[in-house]
Image (cartoon, rainbow, N blue to C red):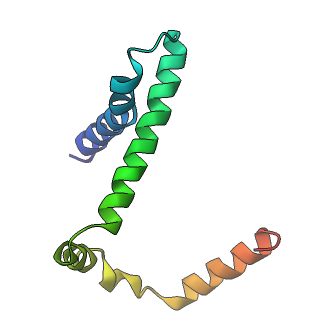
Amino acid sequence: MLAAQLGLSLILLAMCSFTPGFIAVRRLRWRPLEKLCGSIALSLIVLYLVCFGAYCFAPRWLTVVCRGFSGSPFQFMPMKENIRCSILFHLLVPGG
């Protein structure tokens, strides 16, 4: 079951990363590799803008529902692990 979900997720990621941009780029007189790179870049930009717009302009009830299902009970994990991870991060990253 997990393998099927992972496979479908990868297929969906590939489709969302290629198809929207390819629809806009396919009529340009570019070489095939340029079309591939341009369609992936344009698709990711469009996907980013759509998700940002959905986040900013979502109805109030939808944001409340999403926050309810976002795993807020799991945010209170043991503080010892978080502190240890934070200390390790600040030791490893200069200026962090």
Q: Quadrant of residue 86?
A: bottom right
The residue sitting at 25% across, 68% down in the picture is: 58
x and y percentages locating residue 77 in the rendered image: 43, 85
x and y percentages locating residue 90 in the rendered image: 74, 77
The residue sitting at 51% across, 12% down in the picture is: 30
x and y percentages locating residue 12 in the rendered image: 29, 38
Q: Eyeballing the image, is 64 above or below 12?
A: below
Left or right: 81 with respect to 88? left
Name of the residue lying farthest toward the right = 94
| Residue placed most toward the observer, 84 or 60 | 60
Q: Quadrant of residue 62?
A: bottom left
x and y percentages locating residue 25 in the rendered image: 41, 22
| Residue placed most toward the observer, 24 or 3 | 24
| Residue placed most toward the observer, 89 or 38 | 38
Left or right: 2 with respect to 43? left
**Tally of numbered discs:** 0
